[in-house]
Image (tube, rainbow, N blue to C red):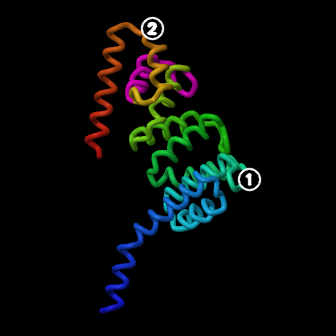
Amino acid sequence: MKNLILAVALIWAMPTLAGAGYQDATDAFDKGDSLTALKEFQALADENDARGQYGLGIMYDMGEGVPQSSEQAAKWYQLSAEQGYADAQNNLGVMYENGEGVSRNYDEAMKWYRKAAESGNKDAPNNIGVMYMSGVGAIKDSLKAYMWFSIAGKGDPAAASNKKFLLKRLTPEEVARAKSLAQEWLKIREQKK
């Protein structure tokens, strides 16, 4: 009975321990202690923890504590993104859009940006909007671009600037339609939560 209680206690504590490992890793990374960050992120990644995989992706992407490798960054972002980690999904989208560590593929970039936006990543809506605004990786569509910049909201200075740029190019009816589409999208996303 004592062993069962101990086993249950250990299982109950595991998420806390994993959370502590992630916090230790991010704290170390923020302090410039790349060795500790690498050790902690790697331990989490070895347990298939999406946050640890994402942390390794960042380290390889930036070349912090490891040799810079876009290929390794993309690998770790992919593993994390497939588990639904929003920031990894967005970063993987950037990798595909820019052809860093993977072959350039705008369809894949848009796919991962959309998943990231649906998962709540704050940068993804602006990234989608830019693709629609520029016509790179998507058919140029100022109304859809304005919609995505509206989804990004006021908290994203780049999206606010892009939205202001498009405001001069859209009719008042188009702006109203784009805002309505943004509200519909946000409402649907909230219902899915």
Residue of label 2: 168
Quadrant of residue 122 within the rendered picture: top left
Q: Estimate the x, y position of residue 124 in percent, counting from the top left.
A: 47, 35
Residue, far right: 67
Q: Is residue 35 above or below residue 7?
A: above
In the displayed structure image, the side of residue 191 where residue 53 appears, left or right? right
Q: Is residue 188 above or below residue 89?
A: above
Q: Residues within 10 Å of mark 1 (few under 14, many from 20)?
A: few
Q: Estimate the x, y position of residue 91 in percent, counting from the top left.
A: 55, 42
Q: Is residue 134 above or below residue 70?
A: above
In the displayed structure image, the side of residue 50 where residue 65 appears, left or right? right
Q: Which residue is at the front of the view, 67 or 76?
A: 67
Q: Which residue is at the front of the view, 74 or 10?
A: 10
Quadrant of residue 163 within the rendered picture: top left
Residue, far bottom: 1
Q: Amino acid at mark 1?
A: Pro
Give the residue at x 39% y 78%: 10
Is residue 141 magenta-colored? Answer: yes
Distance Cα–Cα, label 1 vs label 2: 45 Å
Marks 1 and 2, the one that precedes in the sequence? 1
**Which label sits on residue 7?**
none
Give the residue at x 29% y 22%: 180
Give the residue at x 51% y 54%: 80
The residues colored magenta run 135-151
Q: Residues within 10 Å of mark 2 (few under 14, many from 20)?
A: few
Q: Estimate the x, y position of residue 41 in percent, counting from the top left.
A: 57, 61
Q: Amino acid at mark 2?
A: Lys
Q: Estimate the x, y position of residue 151 in percent, counting from the top left.
A: 38, 29
- Element on which disc 2 rests: loop
Residue of label 1: 67
